[in-house]
Image (cartoon, rainbow, N blue to C red):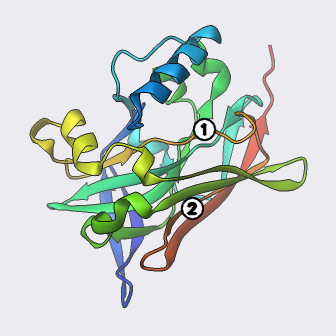
Amino acid sequence: MFDLTFTVDAQDTTTPLTLAIDQMVIAGWTGRDPVARDKHIAELQEMGIAPPASTPIYYRASARRLTQEDRIECCGGDSSGEVEFVLIGWQGRTFVGCGSDHTDRKVEAYGVAVSKQMCDKPIASTLWELEDVIGHWDRMILRSYAWIKGERVLYQEGTLDAMLPVADLVARGFEGGKLPDGCAMFGGTFAAKGGIRPADRFEFELEDPVLKRTIRHGYDVVTLPVLG
């Protein structure tokens, strides 16, 4: 267990909140369209990546991999980010944030669960109350940008109506249909425009077009050499 300090944005007020995080869950295959899901599974099989044991699937990773830093270090040049909404449970409340499921793609080819443990998972320092956004949840937008060869390009973009509803996603993954206190769950992502590829810097955001606000964060990717 370790502490992360956030700012809860309630539109008219902001409040600092320190949360004790003791588990991290990364939900995969959370799309609502089963046809698109199964097509993507088949595509990955052709690349040598084994299909998930279930859909959705809930991978576990060390909570200590969560970071609010603006740079991470990765072994080799085969990793890349993925923008995702993040749900955090705390004392009966659920908060919404935004993070990047940064993943080693070379390791992913032989073990998805192992790949989730290989890289730090950056998360923005701002949170919203779920109850403030659940009424227009499907209209919110996830978006990411990648800096590749000195150019900032739109990497991912989509609205949350493409993913399983929050209640459904939590109910399938947790006993009693409730997110445990101290649990941070990444909720899924969108396909990369132009294909998955590494970047020198990754920026991500969750936009609320109804309440006119955005959660943002960005981080540099430092590549460590692989010797031998």
User: Which residue type carries mark 1?
Assistant: Ala
Task: Tell me where residue 223 appears, x and y as whole percent.
Answer: 77, 38
**Which residue is most to the left?**
176
Other-residue count near label 1 (Cα within 10 Å), few / some / many at <14 / 14–19 / ≥20: few
Q: Residue at x 36, y 61 (%)?
A: 137
**Tag shown at residue 205:** 2
Q: Secondary structure at mark 2?
A: strand
Q: Is residue 119 above or below residue 149?
A: above
Other-residue count near label 2 (Cα within 10 Å), few / some / many at <14 / 14–19 / ≥20: many
Viewed as shown, does residue 141 lie left or right of 34?
right
Q: Is residue 90 above or below residue 115?
A: below
**Which residue is most to the bottom?**
12
C-alpha span from label 1 to label 2 = 15 Å
Q: Is residue 62 above or below residue 140?
A: above
**Tag shown at residue 107:** none
Residue at mark 1: 191
Circles 1, 2 touching at the beta carbon (< 8 Å): no
